[in-house]
Amino acid sequence: MSTVTVSPDEIGLPVDYGGRPITPSRLRRALRLNIAVGAMGMAWYSVCSAQQVLQVFFKNHLDASDRELGLLVAVGQFAAPFHLLAILIYGWLSRRKVYWVVIHVLHRLLGYVLAGVAIHAARGGDRDLGVAVILWASAASWVLTMVSAAGWWSWIADLVPENVRGTFFGRRSAIIHAFNMIWFFAIQISLDYLTSADSLHVYAFVFALGGTLGILDIVLHAFIPEPKRHPAESNIGWREFLEPMRNWNFVQFSLAIGLFTFSTSIFGPFIAPYITADVAKGGIGAPNTWLGIMFVIGQSIWIATVTAWGMLMDRFGTKPIVILGALFPLTWVGYLFLTPTNYCFILPVVALLGGLISPGYWNGVGQLMLTLTPQRNRTAFVAWHSVIVGMIAAGGSILGGVLKDAVREFHTDVGGIPVTSFHVVAAVCFVLCAPSLVMLSRIRKGRERPVGFVVSRLATPGVFRTFLNLSTITSASSSTQAARALRTMDGASSHLAAADIIERLDDPDPEVREEAARALGRIGSLEAVDALVARLRDPASTIRPEAARALGQIGDPRAVPALIEGLGGGPEELEDTCAQALGTIGGRESLRHLRRALNGQHAERVFVSTAEAVSKHGILEAAMDIFPRLHTTTNPVLRGQLAIAMGNLLGEPGQFYRFLTGETAHQGKNLGRLFRSARRAVRSFRASLPAGATPGDALDDLEAELARARGLMEGQSYRAAIEVFYAVLGRLVRLAIGRECPDDVALDYAFPRDPKLGLGFWFIREVKTLMGKIGDPVLLHIDALLALYFLSVYRAPA
């Protein structure tokens, strides 16, 4: 027996450089490891990069100037051009992982340098020397990062499927920030509850521990598989090297992000030192613990929302989410009102709002960058993006430091709030953020939802319920749970779950399939139209009627051809729902086929639905088909539907329903309202009579007749009431003509000149003709009520 060998490529699985397929289970383990080591990397980043811990140590403990602090933040960004060297290096290398691991281990050694500076300062060493060492060591460390970082992005982008990339990075971010929240808070507590001398040794320990975790992060990355690269990715010549710069959409995106980072860097690096600096030095004087409290609040909200932001990216596109997230600098306005006495109230609010908004930007900007880069040359695009952003952003912190030093002595009071150099720098930051958002909004990225659309979906009371139901829909343990969750999906926010609901249209459980179709109709999901049309046209589908009804609720004209096919033949239930859907959608093509269906050989139920659909669009000719069916059907439910259809034609669509239904006492109240409106209709003829006409007491007599008809209606003498309505309508038509004439002549006059009046008179005339044959008092009541309803809504043209 021979053995058939199937390569991983043939079964559609990516393979690593060892030729092993990256199976779903192996991919899942790799992504979990990526999250775990990412937490270690974040521990290094939060203490060894120019973030709050290092900023406070550098500024408040080594006595660095604002200008030097700005330079510390900028030094990593000034190393950005080395990203271009990474393009060439990765172009020469067949693999990315080994090189990235080696270079990044060297980069993470910065943690031990910082620890050494802290020990040197604790022993009374020259702090200016410590400042210089940190600046030079940071520069060297970030150069190493730049010549290798692009490889990680292209490696992980190749590993993580694009359709779940936003959700994965959202979950990754949530877990990493949960760990970082505990880590950062522990650091701040340690720094506050030790003496100032011991605090430098704590800094040394923290930097050393961060360096160790950072190196462990890189080493463990070696166990994450690296998919084989795109065949063309390693062939990087000058054309490939410069390709990103010829893509104006990509360049514009990088410029926008660079300008935004420049703007926020003007102000951001000086926030933590300002909060913790002594009041005598122009600060707020808050303990370091407050940085930890803010971090815990912000990170808690971040963790709670970042996965949801990822879902929003997968469903609505990354760009609108990034733009929404980029509004997070607005939360910094709270810092402008800080005083040494109110910071305990303002700082938590600022942290909460920042944690709510900022994940959209920080977790989305990398995803947006990846979606704008082609796989075959992704390394070059990532590198150029980093260069453009880094070189533009580098000037932000330097400008902030120079500006802050330049206006150091500035001080005034506005409404009891001190205004200092800190506030001046903040104002410059806010002003410069606006142009970058305008540039970002002009980026082209396939089919994404407008920002306003996304906001409208999020600003609804049911958005939290939607996220809870979404979790149930995607991972329900039983069909009952899934169906229950689908039944509650409604409202604008439910658009978030449209893609997941569409998948449930093919669920093994019939109830789930039906509820999925109904949910898509309720939420009006345009993206579901093609999927619903496919089920409608599939003879084997068990949800054809539900699909038709949903398409009617959505109202997209793309569904009309399929609904016409369903109306033209099929089970009675399908024809019925197709007729209703076509009536809801409307349009010339829909109404033409519905009008034709009224004359076709359809079941009574289908005819009634077709009649209702046509009547809602005011096709008066349909009355000629509806009236006979109204008087021949024996089904009381269908008779009521036909009466409503007739009422739609005689008056306003949907208004007759309330007069036909309801409790007896309520109907009596409606009857009085109808007669009062009918009298106003009669009076409306005074202004419309032909010039020179002398109606005399005719209109007053008609009002008296209506008063008599009310008594007849209340006494259920419907035949006599119909006689009165016939006489009143006939007299009104003749008053409009200006002379007496037979009914046929009156109709010939009314229809072409005033179709509505002609239809009303035609209806009451037909009822009077048939009245002797009508033995059902319910039908007589309907006829009388329809005549009265017409009189109540008709007004003579001015």
Image (cartoon, rainbow, N blue to C red):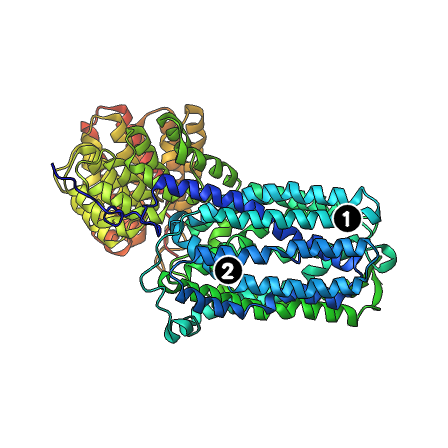
Q: Earlier in the sequence, mark 1 or mark 2?
A: 2
Give the percent coordinates (x, y) of residue 503.
Answer: 32, 40
Instruction: Quadrant for residue 271, please give it.
Output: bottom right
Describe residue 617's horizontal placement relative to residue 210 as left or right: left
| Camera-side residue of 482 and 514 | 482
- Three-letter code for the amino acid on which mark 2 is drawn: Ala
Query: How many C-alpha atoms fall within 10 Å of the one at disc 2: few (<14), some, or many (≥20)?
Result: many
- In the image, 71: left or right of 769? right
Element marked by disc 1: helix
Residue at position x 46%, y 49% in the image: 222
Amino acid type assigned to the residue bearing label 1 in the image: His
Quadrant of the snapshot with the C terminus: bottom left
Quadrant assignment, res 263: bottom right
Q: How far across and how far down the image is residue 378, in percent?
A: 41, 62
Determine whether 712 is above or below 140 in the image: above
Location of residue 671 by image quarter: top left
Along the horizontal axis of the image, is 387 left or right of 724? right
Q: Which residue is mark 2?
A: 149
Measure the C-alpha gap from mark 1 to mark 2: 32 Å
Visible residue check, residue 241:
yes
- In percent of width and height, residue 742 lies at 20, 47
The disc label shown at residue 486, or none: none
551 relative to 58, above or below:
above
> What residue is drawn where x is 68% and y is 69%?
398
Q: Report x, y in % for residue 360.
A: 54, 52
Q: Residues within 10 Å of mark 1 (few under 14, many from 20)?
A: many
Residue where numbered disc 1 is placed: 201
